[in-house]
Amino acid sequence: MSEVNELYQQLILEHNKSPRNFRKPDHTTHDADGYNPLCGDHYHVWVNVQEGKIADIGFQGSGCAISKSSASMMTAAVKGATVQEAKEMFEKFHSVIMTKIGEEIPEEKIESLGSLGALAGVREFPARIKCASLAWHALNAALNNSEKNVSTEN
Amino acid sequence: MTALEKEIVFDVVNVRKEFPILASTVHGKPLVYLDNAATTQKPQIVIDTVTKYYAEQNSNIHRGVHYLSEVATFEYEKARGKVRNLLNAADSKEIVFTKGTTDGINLVAHSYGRKFVNAGDEVIISAMEHHSNIVPWQLLCDERGAKLKVIPMNDEGELLINEFERMLSPKTKIVAVVYVSNSLGTINRIKKIIDAAHANGTPVLIDGAQAVAHMHVDVKALDCDFFVFSGHKVFGPTGIGALYGKRAWLETMIPYQGGGDMIRSVTFEKTTFNDLPFKFEAGTPHIAGGIGLGAAIDYVQTIGLDAITDYERELMAYCSDALQSVRGLRIIGTAKEKASVVSFVLENAHPHDIGTILDREGIAIRTGHHCTQPVMQRFGIPATARASFSLYNTKEEIDALVRGIEKVKEIFG
């Protein structure tokens, strides 16, 4: 399919229209803000970590289809996972979308991402990679209890 | 003149041939360049002028006694004269070459501000300013203990001049307002603003970045105290622009940057400064840029700014009509008087996504806050998609834009 159709495929459009976990959970232990000043994508991510596992996760905010669907898919992928597994998922996702155009990504790598693999096409749109990774950066910051506010321009 | 005769006057087909980049393809499609408010494309004559400067004339200016230095100085100062002529300023001493609009505003904020703006004083700007006409004044007010006041606007994106008149007071030391808004397209009634400010004894700076490529600018008729613009927005090179300042102000203002060429004599005990305009031009300037800007001004004046204004008005009307018929599309900025900028939002599709999909169709628009975050906040939106025209755009390109938007709607439902 064309690059645009691959980027804006059904799954992504669906997550954009009806984002999963689009609320603040009742109980939260960690949270962080993610902001892209260049386009205005702005999300807050909350997590409830219990015994090393992500018992609950939610997000609120607004932005483009890529950032919102990525945030939605992220929450679906990490809910129930351990903090360590969530961080590993981020590393894998990040390395896939940062792969240079023209370089092959092994099929198994994309498959191991599950539905997150739908966003692999964003690497053909370098200006949009920050949109796809914004929520993940916020989640990472929340889990590391590091900065409370993440910006794509740091 | 009948409408038909008027259309024949503007030969856009041949104008386009003069801009080599317009023949490019992007993602396999013909380039449709609708991002002119960000920067304009360059005609071959400007490209050739810059190349010729570096190939045949390059030398440092003002200080040499050899032939090339004389040629370069002559060409650079001739270009300054062209800027003077474009703006209808009285004297070339009132034209300071800068790096661009932002640099020019910072110069005035520093050189005028640090001398004349003190604790308790007020600076007035407007709600639709570009960050370059907000931040320098914020920095100045913070430093001097002065207050920044903002002229509000209505939902159409027009400044409330009555409110502005009420804001003026003996404490108001300068008013800085944009001529044409880069995100809303509004043409402000700056003559009214200038007259009201002058009645209050207050000087006015006009940000003309989005004006000079689209309409006649006459600083004498406007009677503005300062006028700034950027070369790259009027078919000239980047990194060059000009500040017009009334001689009386420039004479009393303190220098902005210190260095070579802005001095008359230097000792460690005392340094004296050069005459206008050199007092404000420290260091080796973008000589090629200035000369290139001169060529761009010649080009624009050959076509004629009246012809350009008329043609672009046609394009604007065509575009506004076409976009208004797209369901789910809302134009942001609906002032009665607008120039060449159409910002819009689409239901169900974020501007960033609109921009990406249009890009794949070869269409270049800009998406985001356009360096006017307060405008976005005022209208309650994170960003807009913005199409901005110039003299080489066509109705066919507007048709392509509309087809592209329909494609976005197809994808986003």
Image (cartoon, coloured by chain):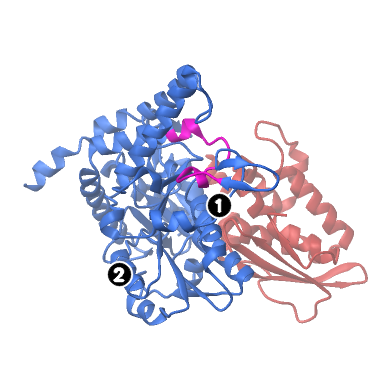
Q: Residue furthest right?
A: A51
Q: Are marks 1 and 2 on the same chain?
A: yes
> Is any atom of residue B257 visible in this view?
yes
Q: Please name whichever residue, B161 or B115, is drawn nearer the observer in this view of the structure.
A: B115
Identity, as a three-letter code, of the amino acid under mark 1 = Pro
The blue one among the chains is B
> Quadrant of the rendered structure where residue A107 is?
top right
Tint of chain A = red
Image position, residue B229 (x, y; %): 42, 49
Q: Can you identify the residue that label 2 sits on?
A: B195
Q: Is residue B275 magenta?
A: yes
Q: Please name whichever residue, A146 or A31, is drawn nearer the observer in this view of the structure.
A: A146
Q: Is residue A18 left or right of residue A114?
A: left
Q: Is residue B107 magenta?
A: no
Residues rendered magenta in the picture: B273-290
Q: Residues within 10 Å of mark 1 (few under 14, many from 20)?
A: many
Q: Secondary structure at mark 1?
A: loop
- Residue at 29% x, 65% y is B191
Q: Can you identify the residue that label 1 sits on?
A: B255
Of circles 1 and 2, the one toward us is 1
Q: Is residue A23 left or right of residue B306?
A: right
> Quadrant of the rendered structure where residue B390 is?
top left
Q: Chain of mark 1?
A: B
- Residue at 49% x, 39% y is B238
Image position, residue B206 (x, y; %): 39, 59
Q: Residue furthest left?
A: B1
